[in-house]
Image (spheres, rainbow, N blue to C red):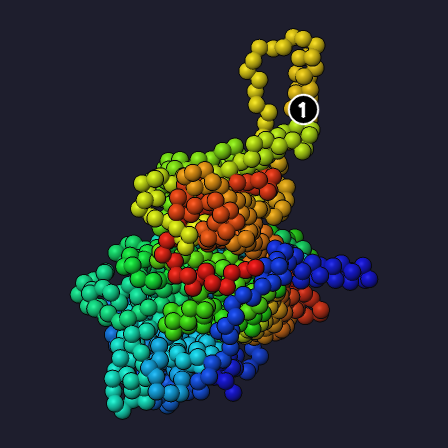
């Protein structure tokens, strides 16, 4: 078995086999895939340079794809998320920023902090979860080192129900991220610690992720392999995915991808699929995420370079 | 559901065909231009009579190259190239890990094809250019090795793969060639060597492709220097007898010794370049051609071939049609390319003929460098533009001398008559912002007078070069002399001449009024100036050359007798519609064709014309109503080797 495949397999199976649910944490937006491409790759994105890297690993903020990246996600018929991100180079620093806003209807009986499945289960309470992040990275002794800061917040309207009054809720928190990456085994290995902050008001998803990715170009096709394991409050997650791309003329290409991941809850399905169409300066990403009871989340991104 | 399928299918078809442009090539005139074969010698592209031997020499320890580790017949010592070529600090360890050596100890590796026999045989070194370092380039000239060795040359394909991927290293490539020559001197002098006394070290040619095409002439220049120009701590002082240089699709100016373009002198020179080069997309070798000067009175010559539909890589069997990397087909229009076999056949033909002529003294091949139509049956069927000059050439007008359009070189007057365009300027390359570092004159004419009468012509436009008596006394032209003219047609067509203004008093008579009305109507009805968006003019250009002696005896001959006058060759390198226009200033390269015109031909046409008293050379624009041409130089040679003039076309 090739060593690259062994690494992917090892990273995927390092997560415990036990099907325990992840401990609840918030704000909710931090638990959802921020990138359409990442969604298609099992959300194993810690070691990938991309426009949305600000949400995964500040060490991989990548200004070479200078442009704006916008994502629209529709969670069943209950929730909508929008994401914008961008990166620029200033001297030896790569700077990035990103904003995520999730709007959905929370069920009256949904416990707080919310879990990802609450986005697809139809409810009646207006809920908003948002995050705004900035980050920077630079090269230090051959390592890409990055730091990021973000503000994240959950807001939920109050509800008058049969069981009484549920008061409105608003919880915000300032968080810090840090990451490293380095070429490794013909690919990139990366480590990120995310969502570090004061968890006295809300249990935070403080997460450590180790991942590896590799691109492989054959004479006709481009392949990307990605895998990662993560630890969050004693819960082990992880995932991996593969992408195959083909360009038939300069500037035009398409890619298909599929990923598996260990999900937060049993209501989410491990498999996700996606694709991309690149047409010169424009790139259109799509990914499909599966939930219980034939629920879907459609992720659609537009990148303008 | 059916409509969804239709829409999906339509989108897929559009995406798959996205923006690909139609193949556009200039009309092939080779059935006419290459219809003759007047050189009767055997083709230089045919195998010779020698049996071919092969061997490798090198370090014997090469980590990556098995042939230079396990199969070397002659071992060489590593050399320190670090003063001439350096690796980016980030890559030092990776490169050393891959190759097993760093820049301080690079190997002298070569693969050799040599003839069976006692010799001595001329030595030809060929070096590849920049390419994927791990996709080894040196085996790609095997087809030349087999041919040349069979014809009595030793061909060495030099391994410089380990400096591929660097930048600013062409001086290192050149220096390495000279270090190989040092090794060859040892091979030739060592009694135990299988090459002992088989190498004619007085007959050496250097050949290079792409960056190697800059390295080869640079090595010839370094060869004559005592010290490295950018750091005199590095001694050169090689002084080999390098007689000939071949540059294949070369770059130029990537390395500039002391910040200047590399000077070249006193060596035979051949450059070949493809119009559809997807890597070095401008004919940079023309600059080398222009810079090469013959100053020592020896019989050198230089020649340039621009081959239509040839690319960058097909002269190397490893590179082939991957000018833009392994996925060239996605960006480059490979449909436009001539076949690899035909492109290499051309390479074999001209390179072999050039080396036969310059190293073996086979003068029967010289005419094809003066006029390639003399080898019409040998050349693959496509279009060629050629430049030529031999060491007897003396310029009359090269347009670099001054900014006065009425003067050429000292003793030469220039005069345009009835021209729509008469201007001098630098010859551009098709790449934006790049030029040939050589000036030329633009001559445009339209002999038609504006008005409804499309047959009404004015005075024939012309451009005259007048040689002063004193210059003629110095140059001493005679019946054996030749005139040089380098000229390119353009796509520009000036509009008809306007009617001259009537400066006399108004004629108030009835006849006068009628005349005035007729003139006014003719102006009103005159065709509008050509719209810049219209298709370029494609009518063939013909020009008459009129010579006159100081006694006034004139003689005229069509310029096409001495070569092919062409408009620019349509060149679209890229697959995407609009990409060529985006990348280049024009979709053609302006390459002047050199016409070599023996004065004897004119004297034969008009015995009264005295070539020894040549006074004027006039370009008479009488055969084509309207066109614009670019003239890059006009000259005369009184010492041309008659062998160049042999095998004239009927």
Residue at 61% in and 72% down:
A258
Q: Which residue is mark 1?
A: B522
Quick check: B150 above or below A132?
Answer: below
Residue at 56% in and 13% down:
B504
The kind of secondary structure element at disc 1 is helix
Please identify the quarter of the rendering in which residue A139 is found: bottom left
Where is residue B225 drawn, in percent x and y?
22, 64
Residue at 32% in and 89% down:
B194
Where is residue B312 drawn, in percent x and y?
49, 65
Where is residue B606 drawn, in percent x and y?
51, 47
Mark yes or no: residue A112 visible.
Answer: no
In the picture, measured across the screen, residue A120 lies left or right of residue A54, that is: right
Q: Chain of mark 1?
A: B
- Nearest to the observer: residue B79 or residue B378: B378
In the picture, measured across the screen, residue B297 lies left or right of residue A169, that is: left
Please identify the quarter of the rendering in which residue B100 is found: bottom left
In the picture, measured across the screen, residue B527 lies left or right of residue B636, that is: right
Please identify the quarter of the rendering in which residue A182 is found: bottom left
Quick check: B607 above or below B383?
Answer: above
- Nearest to the observer: residue B86 or residue A267: B86
- Nearest to the observer: residue A176 or residue B50: B50
Q: Residue furthest front?
A: B608
In the picture, measured across the screen, residue B197 lies left or right of residue B422, that is: left
Where is residue A105 drawn, in percent x and y?
65, 56
Mark yes or no: residue B394 visible.
Answer: yes
């Amino acid at each position: 078995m090739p060593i690259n495949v062994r690494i992917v397999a090892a990273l995927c199976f390092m997560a415990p086999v036990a099907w325990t649910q992840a401990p609840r944490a918030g704000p909710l937006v931090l638990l959802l895939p921020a990138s359409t491409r990442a969604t298609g790759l099992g959300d194993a994105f810690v070691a990938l340079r991309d426009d949305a890297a600000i949400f995964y690993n500040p060490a991989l903020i990548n200004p070479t794809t200078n442009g704006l990246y916008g994502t629209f996600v529709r969670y069943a018929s209950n929730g909508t998320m929008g994401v914008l991100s961008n990166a620029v180079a200033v001297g030896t620093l790569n700077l990035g920023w990103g904003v995520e806003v999730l709007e959905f209807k929370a069920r009256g009986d949904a416990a707080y902090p919310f879990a990802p499945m609450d986005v697809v289960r139809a409810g009646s309470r207006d809920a908003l979860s948002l995050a705004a992040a900035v980050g920077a990275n630079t090269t230090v002794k051959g390592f890409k080192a990055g730091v990021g800061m973000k503000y994240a917040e959950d807001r939920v309207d109050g509800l008058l129900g049969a069981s009484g009054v549920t008061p409105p809720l608003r919880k915000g928190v300032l968080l810090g991220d840090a990451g490293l990456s380095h070429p490794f085994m013909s690919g990139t290995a990366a480590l990120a610690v995310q969502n570090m902050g004061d968890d006295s008001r809300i249990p935070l998803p403080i997460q450590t992720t180790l991942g590896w990715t590799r691109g492989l170009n054959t004479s006709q096709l481009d392949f990307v392999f990605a895998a990662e394991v993560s630890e969050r409050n004693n819960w082990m997650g992880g995932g991996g995915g593969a992408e195959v791309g083909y360009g038939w003329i300069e500037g035009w290409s398409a890619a298909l991808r599929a990923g598996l991941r260990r999900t937060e809850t049993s209501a989410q399905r491990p498999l996700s699929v996606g694709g991309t169409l690149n047409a010169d300066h424009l790139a259109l990403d799509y990914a499909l995420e599966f939930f219980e009871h034939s629920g879907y989340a459609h992720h659609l991104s537009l990148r303008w370079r | 559901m059916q409509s969804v399928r239709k829409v999906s299918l339509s989108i897929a078809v559009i995406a798959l065909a996205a923006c690909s442009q139609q193949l556009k090539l200039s009309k092939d005139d080779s059935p006419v231009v290459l219809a003759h074969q007047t050189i009767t010698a055997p083709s230089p592209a045919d195998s010779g009579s020698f049996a071919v031997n092969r061997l490798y020499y090198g370090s014997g320890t090469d980590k990556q190259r098995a042939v230079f580790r396990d199969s070397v017949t002659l071992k060489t010592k590593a050399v320190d190239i670090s003063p001439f070529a350096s690796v980016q600090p980030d890559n030092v360890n990776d490169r050393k890990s891959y190759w097993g050596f760093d820049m301080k100890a690079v190997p002298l590796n070569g693969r050799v094809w040599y003839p069976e026999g006692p010799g001595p045989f001329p030595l030809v070194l060929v070096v590849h250019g920049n390419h994927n370092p791990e996709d080894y380039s040196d085996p790609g000239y095997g087809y030349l090795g087999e041919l040349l060795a069979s014809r009595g040359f030793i061909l060495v394909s030099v391994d410089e793969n380990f400096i591929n991927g660097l930048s600013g290293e062409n001086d290192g490539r050149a220096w390495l060639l000279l270090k190989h020559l040092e090794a060859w001197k040892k091979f030739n002098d060592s009694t135990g060597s299988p090459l002992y006394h088989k190498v004619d070290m007085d007959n050496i040619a250097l050949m290079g492709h792409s960056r190697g095409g800059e390295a080869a002439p640079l090595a010839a220049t370094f060869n004559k220097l005592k010290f490295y120009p950018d750091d005199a701590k590095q001694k050169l002082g090689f002084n080999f007898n390098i007689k000939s240089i071949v540059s294949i699709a070369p770059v130029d100016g990537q390395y500039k010794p002391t910040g200047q373009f590399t000077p070249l002198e006193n060596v035979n020179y051949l450059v070949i370049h493809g119009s559809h080069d997807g890597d070095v997309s401008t004919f940079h070798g023309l600059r080398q051609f222009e810079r090469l000067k013959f100053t020592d009175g020896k019989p050198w010559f230089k020649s340039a071939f621009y081959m239509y539909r040839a690319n960058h890589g097909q002269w190397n069997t490893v590179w082939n049609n991957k000018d833009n990397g392994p996925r060239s087909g996605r960006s480059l229009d490979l449909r436009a390319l001539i076949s690899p076999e035909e492109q290499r056949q051309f390479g074999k033909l001209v390179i072999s003929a050039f080396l036969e002529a310059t190293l073996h003294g086979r003068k029967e091949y010289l005419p094809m460098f003066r006029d390639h139509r003399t080898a019409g049956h040998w050349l693959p069927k496509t279009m060629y533009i050629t430049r030529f000059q031999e060491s007897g050439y003396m310029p009359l007008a090269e347009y670099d001398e001054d900014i006065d359009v009425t003067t050429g070189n000292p003793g030469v007057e220039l005069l345009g008559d009835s021209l729509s365009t008469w201007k001098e300027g630098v010859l551009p390359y098709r790449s934006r912002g790049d030029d040939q570092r050589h000036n030329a004159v633009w001559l445009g004419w339209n002999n038609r007078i504006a008005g409804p009468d499309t047959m009404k012509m004015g005075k024939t436009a012309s451009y005259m070069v007048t040689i002063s008596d004193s210059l003629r006394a110095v140059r001493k032209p005679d019946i054996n002399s030749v005139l040089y003219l380098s000229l390119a047609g353009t796509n520009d067509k000036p509009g008809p001449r306007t009617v001259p203004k009537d400066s006399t008093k108004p004629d108030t008579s009835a006849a006068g009024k009628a005349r005035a009305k007729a003139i006014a109507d003719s102006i009103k009805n005159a065709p509008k100036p050509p719209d810049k968006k219209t298709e370029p003019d494609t009518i063939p250009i013909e020009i008459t050359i009129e010579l006159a002696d100081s006694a006034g005896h004139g003689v005229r001959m069509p310029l096409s007798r001495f070569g092919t006058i062409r408009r620019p060759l349509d060149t679209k390198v890229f697959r995407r519609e609009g990409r060529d226009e985006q990348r280049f200033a024009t979709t053609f390269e302006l390459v002047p064709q050199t016409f070599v015109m023996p004065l004897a031909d004119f004297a034969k046409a008009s015995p009264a014309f005295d070539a020894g008293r040549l006074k004027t050379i006039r370009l008479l624009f009488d055969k084509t109503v309207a066109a614009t041409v670019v003239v890059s130089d006009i000259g005369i040679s009184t010492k041309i080797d008659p062998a160049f003039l042999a095998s004239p076309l009927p």
